[in-house]
Image: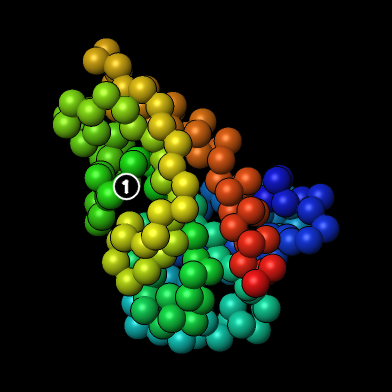
């Protein structure tokens, strides 16, 4: 939101969340961004209501951050190649259901990997499966805890997500 705040070509118009205690809600409200709660049940049993709401709000692209539910097929099909996600590890390794938060960093550590990083990818019908748009890496040291890896990856996410998504959106709008 901070990155797009002064952008005249594109803006964050809406934050949708599925956990009532989502911290991003307060952040969005502080930027004057509309917020809307949909329950997990809404995503699972009534995704067409969410699609209709997004269309009514004239949403062109969807950027996920910290969203753990599988995106319903109706939403993916309504926004082909227009839903982007950030993942706190290098895909295709260390992805899929349950690979989030410290779980993913624990898996990286236990694998003996010498590097980790973040991935920005398109969303398709499976967890962490869509086309990879960008990756950035960082080292994993033997002495690292899962939290050490998480902190290093988070810095990469903050550094790259807004810039990469802005470039991607511009490239799609030019076509």
Q: Disc 1 marks which residue?
A: 91
Q: Position of residue 114 (x, y in %)?
A: 27, 24
Compared with residue 64, is residue 107 higher up or lower down, i.e. above or below? above
Query: Which image quarter holds the C terminus?
Result: bottom right
Image quarter of residue 18:
bottom left
Q: Is residue 150 above or below residue 39?
A: above
Where residue 26 appears, as percent x and y from the top left, is 63, 51
Left or right: 8 in relation to 142: right
Q: Is residue 26 left or right of residue 91?
A: right
- Closest to the observer: 154 or 15? 154
Residue found farthest to the top: 143
Q: Residue placed at 28% from the left, 40% from the top?
A: 104
Few, some or many residues within 10 Å of mark 1 (<14, 14–19, 20+): many
Figure disc tally: 1
Q: Is residue 152 visible?
A: yes
How did the renderer colour the structure?
A: rainbow
Q: Position of residue 19 (x, y in %)?
A: 45, 59
Q: Give the residue displayed 31% in from the left and 22% down from the top.
A: 140
Q: Is residue 147 visible?
A: no
Image: 113 above or below 24: above
Left or right of residue 79, residue 150 in this image: left
Residue 144 at what x, y percent from top left?
30, 18
Kind of element beneath mark 1 = loop
Identify the residue shown where x is 51% and y is 31%: 155
User: In the rendered image of this protein, does residue 35 appear above or below residue 116?
Assistant: below
Q: State the residue at coordinates (28%, 49%).
A: 92
Which residue is most to the front?
Answer: 175
């Amino acid at each position: 939101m901070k990155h797009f705040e002064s952008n005249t070509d594109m803006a964050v118009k809406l934050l949708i969340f599925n956990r009532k205690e989502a911290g991003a809600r307060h952040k969005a409200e502080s930027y004057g961004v509309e917020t809307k709660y949909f329950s997990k049940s809404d995503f699972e049993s009534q995704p067409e209501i969410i699609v209709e709401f997004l269309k009514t709000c004239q949403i062109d692209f969807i950027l996920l951050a910290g969203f753990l539910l599988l995106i319903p097929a109706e939403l993916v099909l309504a926004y082909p190649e227009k839903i982007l996600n950030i993942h706190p590890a290098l895909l295709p390794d260390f992805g899929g259901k349950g690979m989030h938060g410290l779980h993913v960093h624990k898996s990286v550590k236990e694998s003996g990997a010498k590097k980790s990083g973040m991935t920005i990818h398109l969303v398709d019908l499976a967890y962490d499966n869509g086309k990879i748009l960008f990756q950035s890496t960082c080292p994993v040291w033997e002495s690292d805890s899962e939290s050490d890896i998480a902190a290093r990856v988070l810095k990469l996410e903050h550094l790259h997500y807004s810039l990469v998504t802005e470039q991607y959106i511009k490239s799609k709008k030019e076509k």
